[in-house]
Amino acid sequence: MKRFAGLFLLCAGLSACSFYARGPDDYRKAVREVLDRKRPDVEACYKRTYDADHSAQGQVVATFEVEPKTGKLVKPAIAPEGTTANPALQQCVLSSLDGVSLEPPDQRTGVGKFTWSFAR
């Protein structure tokens, strides 16, 4: 463990070194922060869906991977277990994840699951 910590500190001091690896808690926190920045887009999805269908509500559960080295959220998909929102809202939420990435990117692949709840 000390060898890894020393390597990380050495890389942190070099401008050309791009190694960055979060621990599990930091990884979750970083993904949550990125998704929280997309909140206005997700809220706009809900508003559009609700304006078209006043019964629109429920949950959207999405799964995704975080690419190593790029930090891009890829392979977003709706998780059928727990998802109760209508298909239009599901697709809109998935679309809002386009272009999302962690900064700085991580050297490890991440696998995520996130739930958005909608109600009036």
Image (cartoon, rainbow, N blue to C red):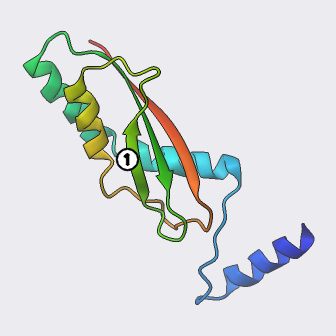
Q: At which x and y percent is residue 16?
A: 58, 90
Q: At which x and y percent is residue 81?
A: 47, 22
Residue 78 vertical position relative to residue 13 in the rendered view, above or below: above
Asked which secondary structure carries label 1, the reply is: helix
Residue 6 vertical position relative to residue 60 in the rendered view, above or below: below
Q: At which x and y percent is residue 9?
A: 76, 77
Q: Disc 1 residue type?
A: Arg
Q: Can residue 75 be seen in this view?
A: yes
Q: At which x and y percent is residue 87?
A: 23, 25
Look at 12% across and 15% down and name the residue there: 53
Query: In the picture, residue 116 is in which quadrant?
Result: top left
Look at 62% across and 63% down and name the residue there: 108
Quadrant where the N terminus sits is bottom right
Look at 91% across and 71% down and name the residue there: 2
Q: Nearer the viewer, residue 95 or 54?
A: 95
Residue 18 vertical position relative to residue 84 in the rendered view, above or below: below
Left or right, 100 with respect to 90, comes to right
Residue 102 vertical position relative to residue 115 in the rendered view, above or below: below
Query: Please, which residue is most extreme toward the right here?
Result: 2
Look at 75% across and 75% down and name the residue there: 8
Find disc 1 in the rendering and name its residue: 37
Left or right, 22 with respect to 64, comes to right
Q: Is residue 40 visible?
A: no
Q: Which of 60 and 34 is in front in this view?
A: 60
Left or right, 48 with respect to 81, comes to left
Circle 1: is it few (<14), some (14-19), or many (20+) Cα within 10 Å?
Answer: few
Quadrant where the C terminus sits is top left
